[in-house]
Amino acid sequence: MTKSWEKYISKNAYKSELKSIIEDILKNNLSSYIVVKLKGYENYFRIRRGKIRIVFIKKEDENEIVAVDTRGDVYKGI
């Protein structure tokens, strides 16, 4: 986990729910979420929780979290 989005989660009101979602993403347990592929990116996906977006890369054996931020800011720098 990178410090930039860990810091964001620690200050967010949904922090326990976001941590749970991130754990599920890392364990590749995505059946209970609506997962959307990002256009223009290969293997990049997102899960939405309210105004928060979690962007991750799907790999064969594990997933990697790329960014966790609000809707307007999460796609900057991907």
Image: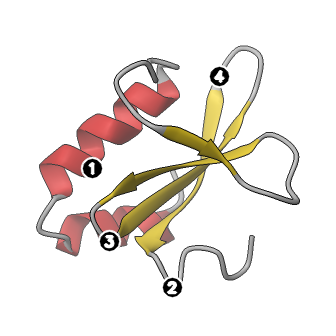
Q: Is residue 52 above or below residue 56?
A: below
x then y, percent, for residue 13: 11, 68
* Residue 18: assigned label: 1
Q: CA distance from mark 1 to mark 4?
A: 18 Å
Determine which of the numbered discs, if any, sits on residue 72 in the image: 2
- Image location of residue 44, percent across then percent down: 73, 47
Q: Which residue is mark 4?
A: 62
Q: In this image, 36 relative to 38: left or right?
A: left
Mark 3 or mark 4: name the one nearer the start of the chain: 3
The CA span between labels 2 and 4 is 27 Å
Tag 4 secondary structure: loop
User: Which of the two discs, 2 and 4, labels the residue nearer the N terminus?
Assistant: 4
What residue is rendered at 46% in x and 24% in y?
30
Q: Local crowd at mark 3 within 10 Å, few (<14), some, or many (≥20)? A: few
Q: Answer left or right for 49 relative to 13.
A: right
Name the residue carrying label 3.
51
Mark whose residue sits in front, 2 or 4: 2
Amino acid type at mark 1? Leu
* Front disc: 3 or 4: 3
Instruction: Assess disc 4: are there few (<14), some (14-19) or many (≥20) residues with their C-alpha within 10 Å of its C-alpha.
Output: few
Mark earlier in primary sequence (3, 2) = 3
Answer whether labels 3 and 1 touch (C-beta < 8 Å).
Answer: no
